[in-house]
Amino acid sequence: MRLKTAILDSLAEEIVKYKVYPSDNEVEEVAEALVSSHPCLKEPGSATGYGGWKVSLKYKLANYRRKLKRLGCPEVELNSLTNKPVDKCTPAYGVKKPRRAEVNYCPTYPSGESAETLEKIRENLLLDVRKRNNEDTLAAMMEKTFAHRRQEVIRDAPLIADYKTRWPALFCLTAEFKRITTVSLLSKFFSELDAHSSKLMRVSGKKGGVQG
């Protein structure tokens, strides 16, 4: 029993490094990989040999998320029952998960900062964005308020017009894409364009007239 608990603890700890809310299929893949790598753990009498491991792992992940919430993990906090509609207050409803390539999906606040202090910085941003030759200051302030901004997007899902009013500097900088995905937007765009340039040239070459 102690061995099984230790295995589940290790698996849960490793899984949440990548996803706090893995899908059912992903949990099954982990359980299957566990039994495939260690045949001695295969469950006798089980159709798959890992069904019990899958169920135990899902419960272990749920317990692990409760621990993360007590530690102040923002992604778990935003998905807690207190942040869901009263008429749809179930753990499975509207779970907010990162999309593909969203590496920094829901970061924690910088050390020593809170929602109140970061909101004050946002208010100062509204004044600084009007100043000329102020790109470095804006970039530093946007970097510092990134977690505050992301939690606002995930929690409130604001309209673009409202979001632009609150964060006008966001639409002046391409750094936000890199903060979320860790990939440079322009570099990614041009590399993909280069990869498809030969096909685009062939398509353009087949057209006649002015377009050709």
Image (tube, rainbow, N blue to C red):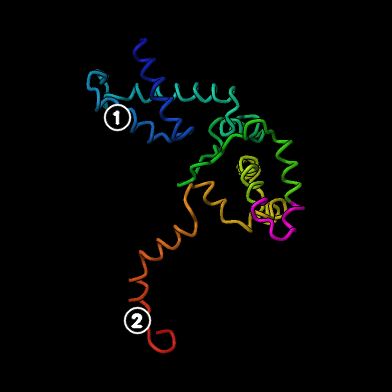
| Quadrant position of residue 135 | bottom right
- Given residues 106 and 32, the one toward you in this image is 106
The spot of residue 26 in percent (x, y) is: 38, 35
Residue that numbered label 2 is attached to: 205
106, above or below 192, in the image: above
Q: Is residue 92 left or right of residue 49?
A: right
205, above or below 67, in the image: below
Q: Which residue sits at x=45%, y=61%?
A: 189
For badge 1, the amino acid type reads Glu
Q: Is tag 1's residue or tag 2's residue first in the polypeptide sequence?
A: 1
The spot of residue 122 in percent (x, y) is: 72, 46
The residue carrying pointer 1 sits among few (fewer than 14), some (14 to 19) or many (20 or more) residues within 10 Å by Cα, namely some
40, above or below 105, in the image: above
94, above or below 34, in the image: below
Q: Is residue 200 left or right of residue 126?
A: left
Q: Is residue 130 left or right of residue 142?
A: right
Q: Which residue sits at x=49%, y=23%?
A: 64
For badge 2, the amino acid type reads Gly
Residue 31 on the magenta span: no
| Quadrant position of residue 47 | top left
Residue that numbered label 1 is attached to: 32
Quarter of the picture holding the C terminus: bottom left
Q: Is residue 209 left or right of residue 33?
A: right
Q: Which residue sits at x=66%, y=46%?
A: 141
Q: CA distance from mark 1 to mark 2?
A: 51 Å
* Magenta residue span: 126-138
